[in-house]
Amino acid sequence: MTIQHATGRTYDKPQVLHITIESQTADEFGLIDLVATFVDASRHISGRVNTVQFPHETVGAAVLAAYDYGNYSSI
């Protein structure tokens, strides 16, 4: 599944993350182990995140948070 997440930021153009979900696995507490790849064309960065998505959080927000904190590997 592929989604787009507009961040509201602008670099050389508006930042929109193109996200491909590789896996989502929920635990008994409702937390979701999320593995996804993303492309940020505005900053010319591509990466893979392995993060926890909270029940109230969108995939885009979870990926952006991991990206902002540097918790991704370049691809």
Image (cartoon, rainbow, N blue to C red):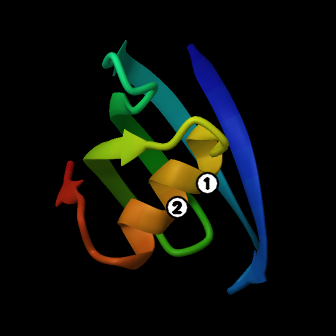
Which mark is drawn over residue 21? none
Q: Which residue is mark 2?
A: 64
Q: Residues within 10 Å of mark 2 (few under 14, many from 20)?
A: many
> What secondary structure is marked by label 2?
helix
> Where, by quadrant of the figure, is residue 50 drawn?
top left
Question: What element does badge 1 sit on?
Answer: helix
* Side of 44 where 16 appears, left or right: right
Residue that label 1 marks = 61
From this view, report whether residue 18 is shown above or below residue 15.
above
Residue placed furthest toward the bottom? 11
Q: Position of residue 7 (x, y in %)?
A: 74, 66
Which residue appears at 58% of the width and 35% of the height?
55
Identified at 37% across, 62% down, the residue is 66
- Splitting the image into 4 quarters, where does residue 70 fall? bottom left
Q: CA distance from mark 1 to mark 2?
A: 5 Å
Q: Are marks 1 and 2 in contact (CB under 8 Å)?
A: yes
Q: Amino acid at mark 1?
A: Ala
Q: Residue at the spot x=47%, y=51% of the render?
A: 63
Q: Amino acid at mark 2?
A: Leu
